[in-house]
Image: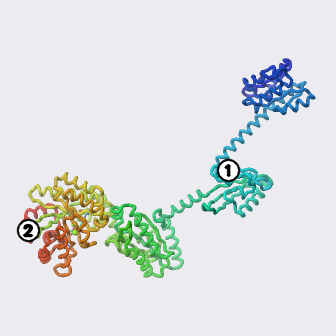
Amino acid sequence: MTEQRGTPPLVLVVDDDPGTRLLAAASLRQAGYATVEAADGDDGISAFRQFRPALVLLDVVMPRMDGFIACREIRRLPGGDRVPILMMTGLDDLSSIHRAYEVGATDFVTKPIHWVILGYRVGYLLRAARAFLDLARSEEKTRALLRAIPDRILRIGADGAVLDLVAGVGIAADPSVEDAGKRTLSDVLPGGIPEEVLRNIGEARKSGGIQRFEYAIDSAAGRRSFEARIVSIPGEESLLIARDMTDRKKAEDQLAHMAYHDALTGLPNRVAFSERLFQELARAKRRNEVVAIVFLDLDRFKDVNDTLGHDAGDRLLVAVAERLRGAMRETDTLARISGDEFCIILPDQRDEHAAIEAGRRVHQAFTEPFHIDGQEAHVTASMGISLYPANGGSPETLVKQADIAMFRAKSLGGGNFLPFSEEMSAEVAARVRMEKGLRSACEKKEFVVHYQPAIDLRSGRIVGAEALVRWRTEDQGLVQPLQFIPLAEETGAIVPISEWVIETACAQAQAWHAQGFGPFRISVNVSARLFHRYDLNATIRDILRQTGLAPGSFELEITESVAMGNMESTIETLWKLNEASIRVAMDDFGTGYSSLAYLQRMPIQLLKIDMSFIREMDRNPDDQTIVKTIIAMAHTLNIEVIAEGVERVEQLDLLKSFGCDLAQGFLFSKPVPAEEFTRLLAENRGMTV
Ligand code: C2E
Ligand code: MG
Ligand code: MG
């Protein structure tokens, strides 16, 4: 009955009779309340404003302002709408009782008042008021919560009609929800609801508990997926919660796709490939079939990226994927493993022969050129193949073997296709060792430069030297460039190696000049990787400045493949080099595109005829014709010509008769260390020309 804790609730007693006020206040204080008193309606209203009582005890009959008016006024005050107002009326005054309720009284007590009972009455009214307030607050909270949930929540009556509906955050935008007049489930659920699901919901409402359904709706905007939960007590109201799962489903599907596919080509990735291979091998085992595993790596893909840019590289990969797919059966699997590496499973082959033939067909997909950005690109691929069961049973082993065979195929110069054989493993081990060694070779200063003279065919004197790098290893002795340059290009080690060679050769040439053996040119080979670096020109000029070598004494050797990679940017770079007085030589001419037409567009100063034309020249008239033509045409373009690989006097004589300007070859000297070259320079009067 009483408030035990905290400040006691305050009761405002309004009565014109001081005796009643006194008794009321006394009995209420006795019951544990605080009181404040007012002698009429007006005072009562001011006291309410001032004290904000928890309850008002209000007399009806008072002079000036009576209790009815006071009650109505209090109800209009802030906080007055919720305060319990207990009116005191005469015992049989029924009309007063009616009016009291009309003006908003909460309850009434009749006079004469039973003072003990009054305390209980007040206590009850206060508790009821508090419970009412708590309920209102809780409902408000629930409503706010429901508004924040992006689900559609429906209250369904026992008869199955929709009682009300809370449109969730995401769903409120849906116009159908605003249509509150609709009363059936299928009317108000998002997108309409399939019959079958409606039946399920009906069943669930009967059986009770929580049930879950999924459904999808096809609309003009596409397919949308929903999840519905129904919470029900049989025979009573139930709640239905519907959630739009479309975006989540899409994200899930996308994640699943991403985990198994390569984003660029859309092909299965390494993970998907491994799983597939596992399945295919298990199947082949049951059926006694042969499976071919192909490992394919594009040749010189780094060049494409370096010269044409990464976007073009990406487009090439997509085109390759398409081309390969077209060369395979539906049941074959093509996967992109990384970068420019693809793996292929060719299952249910009759025998080994058929399996290798299937691989060869895939390899032939590269005979036609690709078209990238309107340019024709001849792309080749190195391919290795391993066979189940001949080469082993485990997926890892078979993939590794195909990879090894691919490696071997690549070392043959690209565009090759090889089946795995046991001997290959040892070679690969050696290559891996070399790759490791290359990485530290620069710091360990294991490289040396040898110099091979270039002879002027009119004077017979040394007019130049080609710098050729060698690698002095601890275990294998002197390694020739052809054995490690391709690998260095692949791994990127070529960049620091080349910079070191340029620096060393320039410093050496400058030293020879200083010793009075000049002037002659030093030429250095550059690979595509280095040539297409944006700072090649600046790097060379820096080195020339540091070593003090005159730019005119330096010559850069590029190959046709470097030049053809990206004609426009090549030409631009060449012009910049020329502007800096740096000479450019076209190396190994005749081995690549062999087009004299494009030479016209390139600012080069020297053409090096590849030794393959010189080798048999004195015995083969066809080669003579070619060499003669190259020399004549180069001269019309004002380009000097040097013949490489001259080993015999017969070759030399022919070259001289064709008007060749320079020659280089074992006939004069092999590439030799710097000290030995110094000796050659010292005797540089009587070379056998
Ligand atoms: P290359 O630029 O065409 O160099 C000429 C190659 O022919 C050299 O092989 C040289 O030793 C060899 N040679 C010269 N005269 C004769 C001859 O009369 N008969 C025969 N059979 N061969 C002769 P080497 O030194 O093994 O170099 C091979 C290739 O490696 C070079 O071909 C060049 O493309 C590359 N290379 C060498 N040094 C470097 C370098 O510092 N950087 C880059 N990027 N490539 C280099
Ligand atoms: Mg060269
Ligand atoms: Mg050459």
Q: Is residue 478 above or below residue 613?
A: above
Q: Secondary structure at mark 1?
A: loop
Is 424 on the left or on the right of 43, as rendered?
A: left
Which residue is the site of mark 1?
167
Q: Nearer the viewer, residue 330 or 680?
A: 330
Residue 534 circle label: none
- Relative image position of residue 98 (x, y in whole percent): 88, 33
Name the residue at 78% across, 58% down.
206
- Which residue lies most toward the left here? 685
- Ligand 3 found in image quarter: bottom left
- Which residue lies most toward the top here? 18
Which residue is the site of mark 2?
459
Q: Is residue 374 above or below residue 623?
A: above
- Relative image position of residue 511 (x, y in whole percent): 13, 56
Q: Secondary structure at mark 2?
A: loop
Colouring scheme applied when the structure was drawn: rainbow
Q: Is residue 133 visible?
A: yes
- Which residue lies most toward the right here? 92
Q: Quadrant of residue 403?
A: bottom left
Name the residue at 53% across, 75% down.
283
- Relative image position of residue 37 (x, y in whole percent): 79, 21
Is 688 on the left or on the right of 134, as rendered?
A: left
- Relative image position of residue 418 (x, y in whole percent): 37, 75
Q: Nearer the viewer, residue 8 or 458?
A: 458
Query: Looking at the figure, which quarter contains the N terminus?
Result: top right
Cβ(mark 1) to ligand 1 < 8 Å?
A: no
Between the C-alphas of marks 2 and 1, the distance is 98 Å
Residue type marked 2: Ser
Cβ(mark 2) to ligand 1 < 8 Å?
A: no
Q: Is residue 300 above or below residue 246?
A: below
Q: Earlier in the sequence, mark 2 or mark 1?
A: 1
Q: Is residue 425 visible?
A: no
